Amino acid sequence: MKKIILTAALCLPLHVSAQPSSQVAWTADQLNFVKAGDPAKGEQLSKTCSGCHGENGISISPNNPSLAGQLATYLYKQLQDYSNGDRQDPMMNAIAKGLSQQDAADLSVWFASQPPAFQSRSPMVYEKAEALVKDGSRDRILPPCEVCHGGDGKGQVMDMPGLSGQNAAYTSATLKAFKTGERHNDIYRRMRLIAESLSDQEIEELGYYYQNIRN
Ligand code: HEC
Ligand code: HEC
């Protein structure tokens, strides 16, 4: 009995918390605001990002995500989420808090305009990953990744990011963070619901699979 009460108590805060996953709402005004970002200003501001995200947004460190060619609206949302504390990373929380919304829009538009990352094409075939990307999993009621992230992993519609060419280590790490709930800024839990039912091995493979797609 004690055990049941304890388990219930541990679970409770998760279930009663009604905190929204993100404070960004995609209204027409919000979209137009990001679209109207000034890439020239963004380029200037990006000098402070290049140590970690690379000269033109192609990160050399496998743990830091590349930003080049990513959807501007996705980048903007992440910067707002870091700034509001809805996505946790001590370094990025501090950096994003120091940016105005205009800075964030300028940076997002500039990074989006840069030629996307491409690491290396390994001859490995990632069959499990490919099946998940193209067919999903009926047993687990998982939709194919490409329904949302696009057939070529280029991303689409506002907040569904491009994955192709991204550093495998980063992709796997962020999928694991969705799986444990440490990352929870996905509106409607769209990524957590999926990542929760992926094995760590599948997550690893998916990272390499997407890194090897040329974008
Ligand atoms: C000290 C290193 C460092 C600096 C400087 C830095 N970043 Fe980051 N950034 C990171 C790391 C590490 C992550 C991944 C953190 C995580 O897992 O949430 C990240 C994540 C991001 C993301 C999320 C990307 C995605 O695919 O979800 C964006 C957007 C971003 N940074 C933008 C910026 C911008 C714009 C600047 C400059 C104003 C900047 N960063 C400066 C290290 C850095
Ligand atoms: C129902 C739509 C949907 C499906 C299906 C889906 N995703 Fe996502 N995914 C999203 C959304 C939306 C986000 C952005 C969440 C946010 O706002 O931060 C995302 C984010 C991600 C990210 C974070 C990217 C970054 O730069 O940080 C990765 C990695 C990812 N998805 C991988 C996958 C993989 C692998 C699959 C298939 C197993 C998959 N997704 C299936 C909607 C989806």
Image (tube, rainbow, N blue to C red):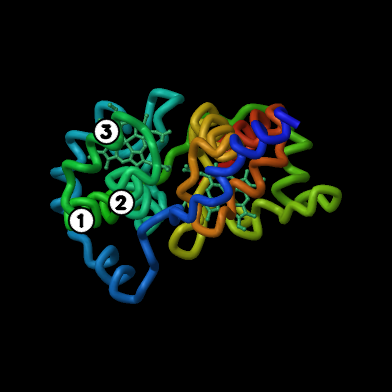
Observer-nearest of 140 and 110 = 140
| Mark 1 vs 3, N-terminal side | 3
Residue at image point 28% right, 66% down: 35
- State the residue lying farthest toward the right: 139
Q: Is residue 203 visible?
A: yes
The residue to which callout 1 is attached is 101
What kind of element bears circle 3?
loop
Q: CA distance from mark 1 to mark 3?
A: 23 Å
- State the residue lying farthest toward the front: 1
Q: Name the image quarter holding the N terminus.
A: top right
From the top left corner, tell me how far across and down residue 22 is, in percent. 41, 55
Instruction: Classify residue 17 as left or right of residue 137.
Output: left
The residue to which callout 2 is attached is 80
- State the residue lying farthest toward the top: 61
The relative height of residue 37 versus residue 108 in the rendered view (above or below) is below
| Mark 1 vs 2, N-terminal side | 2
From the top left corner, tell me how far across and down residue 44 is, in percent. 13, 44
Residue at image point 56% right, 40% down: 178
